[in-house]
Image (cartoon, helix red, strand yellow):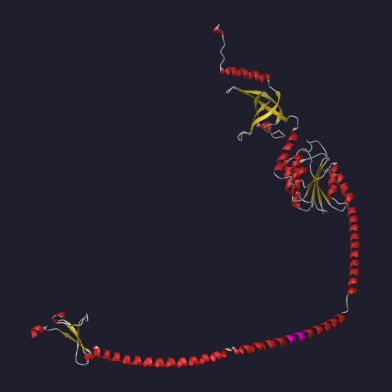
Amino acid sequence: MLEHRHIYSVSEINENIKAILETKFSIVWISGEVSNFRKPGASNHYYFTLKDAHSQISTVMFRSQIRNLKFDLEDGLSIIGLGRISVYEPRGTYQIILEYLEPKGIGALQIAFEQLKTKLAAEGLFDSSRKKELPFLPKKICLITSPTGAVLHDILNVARRRFASIPIEIIPVKVQGENSIQEIEKALQLINDRRTSDVIILARGGGSIEDMMAFNSESVAMAIFASKIPVISAIGHETDFTISDFVADLRAPTPSAAAELVIPSRDELIRRCSEINLRLTSVTYYHIEKLRSTFSEILNRLIHPRQRIQDSRLALDDLTGRLTRHILTKLLQNHDVLTLRLNSLQQVSPLIKIQKLNLKMKQYDQDSLNFLKLYLSKISSRFREITGKLTTLNPLAILSMGYSITRTIPEKTVVRNPGDVRIRQNLEILLARGSLICRVERIKDVKTDI
């Protein structure tokens, strides 16, 4: 029995499984939640796990099918997909290859709209601080819209009714379909390059979300954001919202409402000017009358300058007399005080003390002079006595009596004993006048001579 058994190899098992699965599940619809989403940079294919509450399956979507997606895949997104089962024999694994995807419970365009809205909001394109103010009375308006739609006629009718003299330049573009995004971008760029308009109206009529695709594109949103001229977005009906509405400086519920917002009513402006003029005239007359009344009151309270001068003179004379009397009284009082203090000072005047001190100084000077004369006399006598003694002890004086001084050469040592010199040594003999240079020929000792 064992001889008739068929033993499969691993490859054969995988080949049979591949044939069964790919034949039975050649095309299937599947739904689940995206998990472990990844997109390798080299291939740009999508790899993720599709799961439900009890199971999961590996999933792949190739780059050629990804181009047709209207939204971005992310973890946690519930989807419905169309694909086929594929077995990878070398590893014995199977997966589903998806050809088409759509969000479960919400349209692809709607989820793409929400994703782009979230992205641009995070980048600050919707911030109110970046919105530009609309001009009160624009000199020129540029209208970007389809030249064949009813929107153009609605806006022109509103403009003729409200302020017909404001020029409106029409930039015709496609508002849906192929190349509509590029034409809208170029129109915005053209208007900004020319810089001849004060405001831009970007308008189209109502439609489905597919019809609004051009106004939900990121490139149109970036062109609106980059515009240096204020942009009004008037897309669809009042309940329709597009990305352009959020990026624009102002969103109008309808194209006609956009024209109403940007074009003031000429009749209303004239009426308001008349009202303001009337109010200004009334206020001006009121202030003039009020000033006239105030001037009359002040004029009645004014006193003639001549009378004011006379009153001032009388007051000045009175003040001058009072000041003179006050000054004289103070002078007399000060004179009496000064006289009293002068007498007191004379009694203790420093001059008397100075005279006495001068007398004492003269006496001191005379005594000092006498003392100095006596002291100098004593010093002179002592000096003469010492001078005489020094003269007596002066070697030069001794030399003048016939004596001499012998010194060695060159040491100049005074010779006192014969032993201080040697034969043929030169000696210097100092006399009262001049000196002699001699040589020793013989040394004679006193003892030998005796």
Of the 4 image quadrants, the one containing the N terminus is: top right
Residue 407 percent coordinates (x, y): 20, 83
Q: Going by the image, does 450 lie left or right of 346?
A: left
Q: Please give the name of the residue rendered at 76% of the width and 52% of the height, measured from the top-left corner.
A: 194
Tell me the magenta residue range.
323-329
Residue 219 percent coordinates (x, y): 72, 42
Residue extending farthest top: 1
Compared with 123, 137 (above or below) is below
Residue 295 percent coordinates (x, y): 89, 71
Q: State the predominant SS element of the stretch in magenta.
A: helix
Q: Nearer the viewer, residue 121 or 258?
A: 121
Q: Please give the name of the residue rendered at 74% of the width and 86% of the height, measured from the top-left corner.
A: 329
Answer yes or no: is residue 336 visible. yes
Residue 335 percent coordinates (x, y): 69, 88
* Number of marks in the rendered image: 0
Residue 56, by quadrant, is top right
Residue 85, by quadrant, is top right
Q: Nearer the viewer, residue 447 or 11?
A: 447
Q: Nearer the viewer, residue 323 or 8?
A: 323
Q: Please give the name of the residue rendered at 40% of the width and 91% of the height, measured from the top-left corner.
A: 372
Q: Please give the name of the residue rendered at 20% of the width and 93% of the height, measured from the top-left corner.
A: 401
Answer yes or no: is residue 46 visible. no
Compared with 440, 53 (above or below) is above
Q: Going by the image, does 382 lie left or right of 79?
A: left
Q: Going by the image, does 298 lie left or right of 320?
A: right
Compared with 207, 289 (above or below) is below
Q: Going by the image, does 290 lie left or right of 246?
A: right
Of the 4 image quadrants, the one containing the C terminus is: bottom left
